[in-house]
Image (cartoon, rainbow, N blue to C red):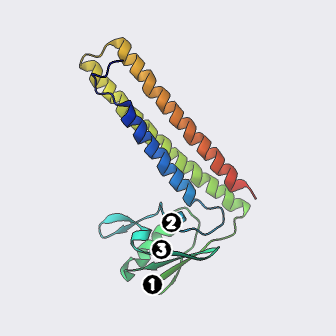
């Protein structure tokens, strides 16, 4: 396989690894009953005309094992931060006390564990879609290269490489999901 066509497998792999890294971060935020500042990392709030992470709108603390607090710096953002947390799928009901939003972390019952496994599955599906989109980009590069003179055999070999890479990354996502769901369901 020659390198004279614009197929950059390393770039495709780097982008796919980025999607898996993002999934790992989302999974890390899915806590199994313990408070953690990291559980808020995937939540974005519409602030000042753009989506902003919560930790850029206030100070996040974990004063006790089942409580997270957010000291929101701009009082006008309190309602938006609360709404983003409610709609995040974490199953946490924020309680506002002045500029402080308290997030009591509920004990995980069987129903809540099932909900969390569904959230984990949604995160994994988003990662799979990202991987498939990157694969599509790679296949589009191949089409352009074929139009520019790539041989049929070379095109087939590159297509198989892209598909093998994609399959490996999808398998990695499935394993991560399986492990996370197992972790969530453990008592």
For numbered disc 2, what is the local secondary structure? helix
Residue displayed at 39% across by 70% down: 56
* Image position of 85 with respect to 166: above or below: below
Q: Is residue 133 visible?
A: no
- Placement of 167 over or under 130, stated as above or below: above
Q: Is residue 174 visible?
A: yes
**Residues at marks 3 and 2 touching, judged by CB atoms closer than 8 Å:** no
Q: Residue at x 72, y 64 (%)?
A: 109
Q: Quadrant of residue 146?
A: top left
Residue 132 pos. (x, y %): 44, 36
Mark sitting on residue 82: 3
**Residue 116: mark:** none
- Local packing at callout 3 (Cα closer than 10 Å; few below 14, some 14-19, many 20+) is many
Q: Earlier in the sequence, mark 3 or mark 2?
A: 2
Horizontally, residue 170 falls left or right of residue 161, namely right
- Marker disc for residue 99: 1
Q: CA distance from mark 2 to mark 1?
A: 17 Å
| Residue 53 image point, x, y percent | 41, 65
Mark 1: secondary structure: loop
Q: Mark 2 highlights which residue? A: 40
Residue in the image at 31% along x and 28% along y:
141
Q: Quadrant of the N terminus?
A: top left
Marks 3,1: beta carbons within 8 A:
no
Quadrant of res 110? bottom right
The earlier-in-sequence mark between 2 and 1 is 2
Query: Which class describes the residues within 10 Å of circle 2: few (<14), some (14-19), or many (20+)?
Result: many
């Amino acid at each position: 396989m020659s390198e004279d066509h614009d197929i950059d497998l390393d770039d495709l792999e780097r982008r796919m690894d980025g999607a898996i890294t993002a999934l790992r971060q989302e999974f890390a935020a899915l806590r199994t009953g313990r408070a953690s500042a990291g559980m808020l990392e995937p939540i974005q709030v519409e602030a000042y005309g753009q989506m902003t992470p919560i930790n850029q709108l206030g100070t996040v603390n974990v004063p006790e094992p089942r409580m997270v607090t957010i000291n929101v710096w701009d009082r006008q953002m309190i309602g938006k931060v609360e709404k983003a947390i409610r709609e995040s799928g974490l199953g946490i009901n924020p309680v506002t006390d002045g500029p402080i939003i308290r997030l009591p972390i509920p004990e995980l019952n069987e129903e809540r564990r099932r909900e969390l496994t569904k959230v984990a599955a949604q995160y994994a599906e988003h990662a799979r879609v990202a991987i498939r989109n990157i694969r599509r980009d790679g296949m589009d590069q191949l089409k352009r290269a074929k139009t520019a003179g790539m041989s049929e055999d070379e095109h087939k070999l590159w297509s198989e490489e892209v598909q093998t890479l994609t399959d490996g990354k999808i398998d990695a996502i499935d394993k991560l999901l399986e492990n996370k769901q197992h972790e969530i369901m453990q008592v």
